[in-house]
Every structure is written in C-alpha cells, then in structure tokens.
Amino acid sequence: MFVTQPLWSSHGMDGKMSNMTTASHLKSSTTHIITAVRVAVLLVCLIETDVSTVIQNPVLSSVLVDPVFTVKHVREALAIQSLTGHPYSTITFRDAYAIPGTIHLPPLLLAVCELVFVQVDAENKIGQLKRGLLLIIIDLLVARSLELIAKSAICRLDAANNWEESLQQKIPHILQAPLLHVFGLHTETKSDSSQPLLHLSDLPRFVSQLYYASPIVMLATAKGSFQNLETLFIVQALAQSALSTGSVVSSAMWLALATYMNIHCVIMLIPIAIWMHRRSKQDATLTIILSFLFSAALQLLTLLLIGSERYYNVMVATQFHSFSFVGMQPSLSTLWYLSMELFGRFRNYFTILLGGVPYITIIPLTVRLHKYPFALAAIFYSFGTLFRPPGTLYSLNVAICLAFLSPRSMAHMPKVRSIILVCAIPVPIILYMVCYWLWMDTQVGEANFVYFQCIAYNVFVGLLFVEFCSASLQRDKVLRVTEKL
C-alpha cells in the first residue's frame, strides 16, 4: 500500500490493462510527431518573427494562460522583493509580498520557480529553450497519467462483478442511453451494427492525445506558463487512487501539492477518497488524514520561509485571491467585470455569494453520484473552470479530458443540444479576442463588448457541463430503476 509506483511507467498495472491493444502514449509514433511539432513551435517563439509576435500577443495570453503561473509574475515578485528589502539587511521572501494584493504565487512555489525558471537571464535563448522543454515534459507526464486513469476506467467497466455492468444488460430498451453506440457500449437489448466513433480500447490514447495534441495546451506551454504543474499534481493524485496498485501516500502528497497551488483542488479529495474506499475503508481514512498532514507541513514550511508577521496576509493573497474580487485581469471569466463595478461595501457579500454558493452542490452530488467517481472528478474540476478566475481555455481542455473518462455518462447526453453547445463555444471566444484587441490595443472598444462575450462563453460552457451532470444523474436513475424491476 505504501510502495510508490511511477505512474508514467507501464509496470504494476492490472492484467486486463496490460493486455489491451492500446499502445503506451509515450511510445506512440503520433506522440513523437506531436512532440517534434511542439518543439518547433517553441523554437519559433524564441525567434523574433511575425509568427512569434502573434503567439506572444496579450490577446492569446488572456484566453490561454493564468497570469499567476507565468515567469513574468515570478519576475515581478522578485523585483518587488529586491526593491522593498532593506539595503543593509538580508532580503527575504517576505519582501516579495510587501505590496498587498500584487503577488499571488504561493511562497514555496515562488522559491522553486526562482531556482528553475528565473536564474537564467531573460535574454538567454538556451535557458528559455530548456524551460520550454521542461514544460513539454510536464505535459507528457500529464498525458501519460490521463492514459492510465482511462485504462483504469475501462478495467472497471469490464469487471465481471461490476454493479453497473450487471445491470446494463437488464436495462429496458426505452431507458437505454441514446449515445451508447458512439463508444461501442452495446447491450443485449440494444445493439447496433455500425462502427463506434470511439471504441473503449481507443479511449486511453484518445484522452491522452486530446490533452497533449491540443493547440490550446501547445500554445499555453509555448508562452512559458507553468499552470500545467497544477494539472500534473491533480492527475497524479487521481491516478494513484484510481489504479489498484497506486500508493496512498503518493496520492495524498500530490493532492496536497495541488491544493497548495490552488485551494479549489481540495474538493478532489472526495473522488480520491471514494476510489480508496473501494480498496478498503482504512485506505480512504488514511488518505484523508495524510492529505491534511501534508498540507499542514507545506503551510509550516511557508511559515518558516516568510515568518509569522506576514503569514496571514500572504495566505490570503495567495490561497484566496480568486475569491476576493481584487486585482483581476480581463479573461473569459465574468468575475473580472464584477470586480470593476462593485462598490467596496458589497465586495464581501459577492465574495461569499459567487465564491461559496457553487460549492453547496458538492454534498448532494456526492451523495447521488458516489458510485461514479470518474464523473464526480470531471464535475468538480468544471467548478473551477466556471467559477474560479481567470477563465482559460486550458482549464476547459482539461475538464473535457476528465469528462471523457466517464463514457457511460457522456452516452446519456442529448445529441442535438450537445452538438449545438460545442459548436457555439468558439463563437464568443473569437469575438472576445476581437473585442479585447479593440479595447486594449486600438483603444476604440470598451469593456462592455468584452463582457458580453464572456457571458455568452460562460453560458455555453456552463450549459455543456450541466448536460454532463444531468447525464450522470440520468445514468444513476436508470440503473436504480432497472435494479427495482
């Protein structure tokens, strides 16, 4: 139970997973080609050309990148640290947070980023290339972890004693999911001779490539954002809990690291604990306890690094800045506009309303969908995509990857409405980029034009995830009704 198995290796997997025809993501020729393309894009960004100017445009940054997890933000913190430090005393990391509400990067992460990303001079192209290659490696590990989680999902679907699989053969024809044939999930009561669009054996490779080959992820990495580090921590924690050979200690450690970067990730403890409970009740309890112990250890290290005088203010600025409606930059989220228009006296009210109300649904969803932790993980992650600024296409891409880990839930989604929503999402994104350029660059637009596109984008994305959540509930309802027949 306590043996840590590297998740990007193929050892230690169940027999059913190892016998699958799907090749490893790391060994796939498609992955090699995509990696070469990503390195080429990285090289183009390092060379001052018209293409690199377009890629580094602030318009793309506002839709792709969380500005907190960028080298620019790290350099800003170090500049404040050097300017506010006392000239005749040792400069400490607490000086980086001397200006309230400016730096939102957690202190331990800031210390690591200074060593990894900023020690090399900004004009050193070799150093920037090494940094970009490191980010590509992180994306590779994320894709590999997603592949292993998908293989675990398939193994659970194929288990002989699986509760859902046994009831699936008994579901009446009228209650069958309309999109079962898309994933090749045929049953005795509903069969289709047509070929599935995405067979279950291809799901692991599809999910991994949906992340790794995505132009969104490719451009975000090329722009030097290390927001994929948080994603790596999350998927590693999920994979260690979903795999039967995963480590309790590793799962708790990865989750604590993700929570330290983004406090929203703490709700991922629920699907992780459910997976662990399927092994044993002891594993679930131990995971919860270790997660809080690791988080406490990180906070203790932070306290030792910055001191007790500024600890509270630093924690508010770094852990809860996305709830505070202060210092937000324009993004696909609608909360930045509200932060501009709010009166100071109403700021705390809207912080509680918009920051806390979405999480009220966590308990009822967990009670209803506790048998489907893959669906819960996708739904909980989508909360951050919708309600935690800044809204980025990168987080949307990760949320969609997690949703595909629940093919039986997606099979219950309405075909027409889902297609309309998927086709509608790119429209406000394009209009947002145009309006952002008119407002910020040419100075002929205004914030209202951008805000309207943010509303449309969040409505379409929100409705899409509502359909997924409704499909998961419908999946559970159908199985419960069938069980009573």
Image: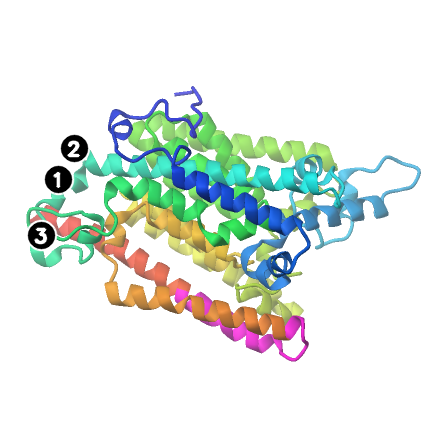
* Picture residue at 32% right of the left edge, 56% below the top: 469
Q: Nearer the viewer, mark 3 or mark 2?
A: 3
At label 3, the amino acid type is Lys
Q: Are marks 3 and 1 in contact (CB under 8 Å)?
A: no
Compared across the picture, whether 55 is left or right of 384 comes to: right
- Earlier-in-chain disc, 1 versus 2: 2
Mark 3 and mark 1: span between their CA atoms? 15 Å
Q: Residues within 10 Å of mark 2 (few under 14, many from 20)?
A: few
Residue underneath mark 2: 161
Mark 3 secondary-structure assignment? loop
Residue underneath mark 1: 166
At label 2, the amino acid type is Asn
Q: Are marks 1 and 2 in contact (CB under 8 Å)?
A: yes
Q: Which residues are magenta?
A: 439-460
Q: Is residue 480 above or below residue 160?
A: below
Residue underneath mark 3: 190
Residue 441 magenta = yes
Query: Can you tell which mark lies on residue 314?
Result: none
* Picture residue at 20% right of the left edge, 36% below the top: 158
Q: Quadrant of the N terminus?
A: top left
* Picture residue at 38% right of the left edge, 47% below the top: 402
Q: Position of residue 405 (x, y in %)?
A: 32, 45
